[in-house]
Image (cartoon, rainbow, N blue to C red):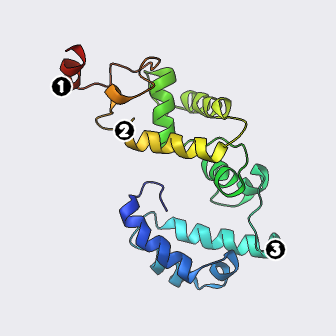
Amino acid sequence: MLQQTQVDRVLPKYREWLDKYPSLKALAAAHPDEVDSTWRPLGYNARPKRLHSIAKEAVNTHGGKLPSDEQTLRSFKGIGAYTAGAVQSFAFGRRAPILDTNVARVLFRVFIGYGYRKDTVTQKRLWTLSATLLPRKNVYDFNQALMDFGALVCTARKPRCLICPMSPICEAYPFNLDHEQVVQHRS
């Protein structure tokens, strides 16, 4: 629900969703129209259909549980590399890379610094970086911190470079600074 949607919009819907669908079995048993209406107004209206389909497959094929391995997760329609990594990391505590919008921005700025972040070659490089940087332990905390860092410090607009602990090694610094920050930085 948090992919591309603000937390304040998600929280009430998240609570409603969990009240209605406390398990994959409950979600799989629900009528698709009910699932759609529960999801609204979050946008990305294909997601409730995919979640419903995933729940049904998990119930029918995996005993009502989501599998923990990447290959099986990615076999579900609607689960790609990011979601598989997020499920592995956040639900199962496994050592799995993630590359959401915030993480991609941080890794791109710190390690690459220029070019087009969304081209295929750069995306592959960012996935490799995400996997390479993973610690052996506390992967959940690391991935969550990297996402939060992108949301709070290395933001899309007006990044907070002056307080960023990565600025000494950041390939994009000081190019992300706006004029006011440059003046403050030089003082």
Mark count: 3
Please name the residue shown 52% across and 76% down the image.
17
Q: Please tell me whether mark 3 sits on a helix, a strand or a loop.
A: loop
The residue wearing badge 3 is 63
Disc 1 designates what residue?
A: 180
Is 5 situated above or below 126? Answer: below
Q: Is residue 59 above or below residue 85?
A: below
- Disc 1 residue type? Glu
Q: Earlier in the sequence, mark 3 or mark 1?
A: 3
Cα separation, mark 1 vs mark 2, equals: 17 Å
Q: Which residue is the site of mark 2? A: 155
Position of 166 with respect to 31 (left or right) is left
- Which amino acid lies under the numbered mark 2 shown in the image of this protein? Thr
Foreground residue among 171 and 145: 145
**Residue 46 place in picture, x, y as percent:** 51, 66
Q: CA distance from mark 3 to mark 1?
A: 57 Å
